[in-house]
Amino acid sequence: MAAVKRTIYRALYGSRYDRVPWGQRIYVRPGERLAREVQWRLRLRRAELLTLAEYRERTDLGEIEEFVVCHLCGDSRQQPLFRPTGPKGRWSYQVVRCPGCGFLYRNPNIRPERLGDLYANGYSAFLTGKYAADRRRRYRLTMDSFHPVFAQGGGRRLLDFGCGAGLFLELAEQRGFDAAGVDLSPDSVAEANRRLARARAYHGTPEDVPEIAVGGFDVITLWSVLAHLPRPLDDFRRFRSLLAPGGVLMILTVNAASLQLKAHGSAWNGFTKNHLMFYSAETMPTLLRRTGFAGVAFTPFYGDTVEAGTTKLSEPLQRRLRRKVEASDGGNMLRALAFADDEAIDRWGGGLKVRRLPKYEG
Ligand SMILES: [Zn+2]
């Protein structure tokens, strides 16, 4: 099958795009977007639509798992789409789509009280190992995309939720934020506090820590954390209440509307071992609206090497990639700035395309 595809692409395009990495090729090859959208539509049309009872009957349930319904709209119907599987089959889970609102989530999901099991050992090594330089670069590029919020801390209070080993807290304190973090992994928190000068990391949830539970934060950051949350509505209500008037919540997560997901299916790089839920610019506003946020702005993600200027892609292809990302999926990662209230929109929304969220009655 792969050989057939290669032959077709070679006939269509020659060898022009052979050296463009896969993640970029999908945005620069003419016709690719249309082909992937058609592929996606066909996949949705072919997928079964089951009641929750039917779905439970045919699906195995692990010891730390539970069946859930769509957290965003409450629809219990299940459209099984993907089965991501780790190297050598070490892990595997089922991803379903909500036919009501299009939300993608793992089902069965992890029982919240067992979430710590996923992060008990070895996670801090993953966070600080050879990927540390890439992560720092990604923090800087995303902070730049929401420039005024992160340019200078000026003593503003910042909470990094899921702070890991403190790589971002370190940047935040260097920029003058009064920064604190929480994380479920005790190893990571210990590592973070060795690294930090003034900022502090705490083990547990915000309500476990009196210094954090008092709230009054100007900025809360969720770096690659949202996809790990089994009860996002509860968490986001808490974030909203921890924010000071004029406060903002910054989110970086994998983008479930990505053309790469549509192309790779179960092999998409956003389906990692511990990810539970997959948001897009269509579904995330529902979560924010239901938890009391007043607005949201998304900035496109062109890929780390393009944004950092280290890509080998030619100038014309870079321009094409940027245009495509803006006109199609917004990129393989989703970057969002959520505004607590109108004051936050006035203060930080300049230069961004802010989408105001109507008050939720429910
Ligand atoms: Zn739904």
Image: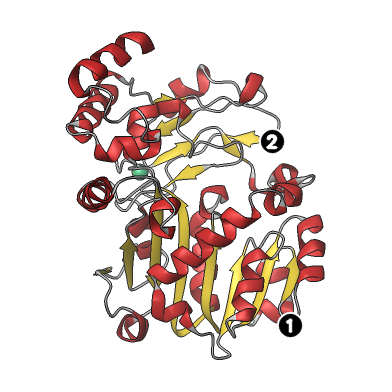
Q: Give coordinates of residue 37: x percent, y percent.
A: 22, 32
Q: What is the three-letter code of the residue carrying label 2?
A: Ile
Residue identifier under label 2: 64
For numbered disc 2, what is the local secondary structure?
loop
In the image, residue 93 above or below residue 233:
above
Q: Amino acid at mark 1?
A: Arg
344 over 332 or under it: above or below? below
Quadrant where the N terminus sits is: top left
Residue named by callout 1: 198
The answer to which quarter of the image holds residue 201 is bottom right
Tell me: 326 left or right of 229: left
Residue 245: x %, y % from top left: 44, 86
- Mark 1–mark 2 Cα distance, whole angstroms, equals 37 Å
What x and y, as percent, mark residue 312?
A: 39, 45
Q: Residue at left 28%, top 40%?
A: 27
Q: Residue at x 66, y 64 (%)?
A: 167
Vertical side of 183 occupied by 80: above or below: above
Point 57% across, 81% down: residue: 175
Label 1: how many Cα within 10 Å (few below 14, some 14–19, many 20+):
some
Task: Give the residue at x 48% y 40%.
Answer: 270
Q: Is residue 167 left or right of residue 58?
A: right
Q: Which circle's residue, 1 or 2, is located before the other in the chain?
A: 2
Q: Nearer the viewer, residue 16 or 217?
A: 16
**Of the residues tagged 1 and 2, which is closer to the observer?**
1
